[in-house]
Amino acid sequence: MLSTLRIRNLALCEDVTLEPGPGLNLITGETGAGKSLLVGALQLLLGERADRQIIRSGAESCSVDAVFHVGAVDAVARLLAEEGIDPCEEGELIVRRVVQVGGASRSFVNGSPARLQLLRGLGEILVDMHGPHDHQSLLRQEVQRQILDDYGGLTDGVRRFGEVHQRWRDALRRQDELERAEGASDEERELARFQLAEIEQAELTPGEGERLREEHRRCAHAARIQELAGRCALLLATGEEGTLFDRLAEVRRMLDELVGLDGAAAPFLGALEPIQSSVRDLAASLAERAERAELDPARQRELEERMALIHRIARKYGGSEEEALGCAAELRAKLDRWAGAEARRAELAREIAALAAELGERELELRESRAAAARRLGDAVRARLASLGFAQAGFAVSLEPGERTAAGSDRVDFLLCPNPGEELRPLRLVASSGEASRVMLAIKTALAAQDRVPLLVFDEVDANVGGELAVRVGEHLRELARSHQIVCITHLPQVAARAEQHFRVEKDIAGGRTSVRVERVEGPRRVEELARMLGGGPAALQHARGLVAARDQKGGPVLGRRAER
């Protein structure tokens, strides 16, 4: 239950305090007096977007403070624990929101800084707000579906369906991404396999081409190699007279004679010996090379064919053996990736099929639950519509298959027949604004038994009704107040007369500045306020007394009750 709401420097509210009690709290006042500022302040406190334009002119900041009596609401305790906020002392939750001219807004819960997300979470648990145009949202099918789910207690079932639906959508997205990232046509795959096989069959090794070209040169010039090596061997050591070795032998004989005549010439003889040995060895090597340089046309052709293959593969796949081998590695990796993608696609297909089957089962369960809830909601709303001026109105909740979304595939339509003898038709096609408002009120009272939110705030939900219907609206609100704390802004005296706590909002002008004032009206002052709402004058005053007396005859305020749920 909301016990205190204090507003400072918010628009026309310089310093306003509202202390609603349990049950039905009615707020009245002239049009434009600032009644809706109270609702706006509560919305700001519970996480609405902050606009610095709401700060009162001349002030540096505005603030909204509230004290809620939450008793032992487990959901509140869990939220506070998750955020590391101190628990409520004696069941009191203190929430504060400050908006500054030159900076971001700040939020506090039980004296500790808090995120807006926490304020919004607390708002979902503690307060349900209904504005003057909520009946317009009632015409939207997604809102009707949400109402049906709330009434049927299907929120958890819808959440579980949404989780499976999200996994199914994620799997479809991954499948699409895999197709785009790793997808390849059969032609692309076949070409990659052919190219890899072509490179692998060539059995390339780095530097092979250069080695083969060198061997081919030797093979192509074998005759000339043989001729040159053999002739060199002959000139060095053997064969024709007058070879280099013969001349060195002649030099040796002369040096032997020289040493015999001059012992100092012995080193010359020592220097000659390695020269003779080197010439002999060189001649032998050249002779051996001449013998090995055989003409082999078959080997030459084999080399030419191999060189042609290497040249063709290298030119086709990069320009060299190394680049062709690198291309083969890339092709092999791509084919492996594609093969892996095939396995992943098959796995994804199995996952998608399993999720689709689970979705189908949950979808059927959800549809059956909604169908049962639709029948109960239709009965409950019809019963309440009868007391809101639709004596013989028809109302039903229709379910039709629709597009699958995170909330299921049921298309929900509220059907209304406001007058006897007509067919049920979608509410959005047949309801006037006044009728839609009454349908909304009937639905809200029908939902009250299911709704565990302790505070309901109505901002002129009784718009577009009057007379006897206004009396019935007041009775409905009072009935709803037996299980909830209600704060309601109204222009209808018939509704205001049903209040357990009645507040009046007025504008004051002092020092050239306008500010809003909220006061509790009781006893004679309350009768005067009702008379003002009735138009003023002695007759209105008498009528106001009658409204209060009629209300008291139906039972006074439910004293001692606190809407702490």
Image (tube, helix red, strand yellow):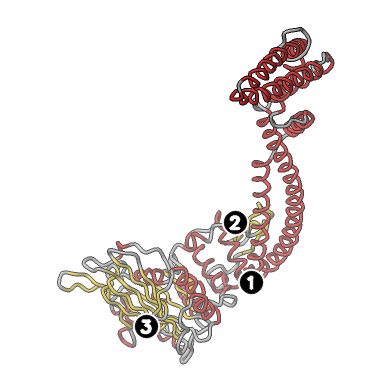
Badge nearest the viewer, 2 or 3:
3
First of labels 2, 3 by sequence position: 3
Task: Describe residue 369's horizontal placement relative to residue 380 as left or right.
Answer: right
Using the rendered view, name the quadrant where residue 462 is placed.
bottom left
- Is the residue marked by circle 1 packed among few (<14), some (14-19), or many (20+) residues within 10 Å? some
Q: Position of residue 140 (x, y in %)?
A: 55, 57
Label 1 is placed on what type of residue? Gly
Label 2 is placed on what type of residue? Pro
- Look at the numbered disc 1 and give the secondary structure of its residue: loop
Comparing 169 with 91, the one in front is 169
User: What residue does disc 3 label?
Assistant: 19
User: What residue does disc 1 label?
Assistant: 153
- Is the residue marked by circle 2 packed among few (<14), some (14-19), or many (20+) residues within 10 Å? many
Comparing 30 with 169, the one in front is 169
- Residue with the most extreme bottom position: 560
Comparing 503 with 553, the one in front is 503
Give how far apart the Cα atoms at labels 1 and 2 are. Answer: 24 Å
User: What residue does disc 2 label?
Assistant: 426
Task: Describe residue 63's horizontal placement relative to residue 325 as left or right.
Answer: left
Q: Position of residue 538 (x, y in %)?
A: 29, 80
Asked if the residues shown at circle 2 and circle 3 are in contact, with their CB atoms under 8 angstroms apart, the answer is no
Which residue is pictured at 52% across the width and 66% down the height?
Answer: 440
First of labels 1, 3 by sequence position: 3
The answer to whether residue 338 is above or below residue 19 is: above
Q: Position of residue 496 (x, y in %)?
A: 40, 78
Which residue is pictured at 72% across the width and 45% down the height?
Answer: 341
First of labels 1, 2 by sequence position: 1
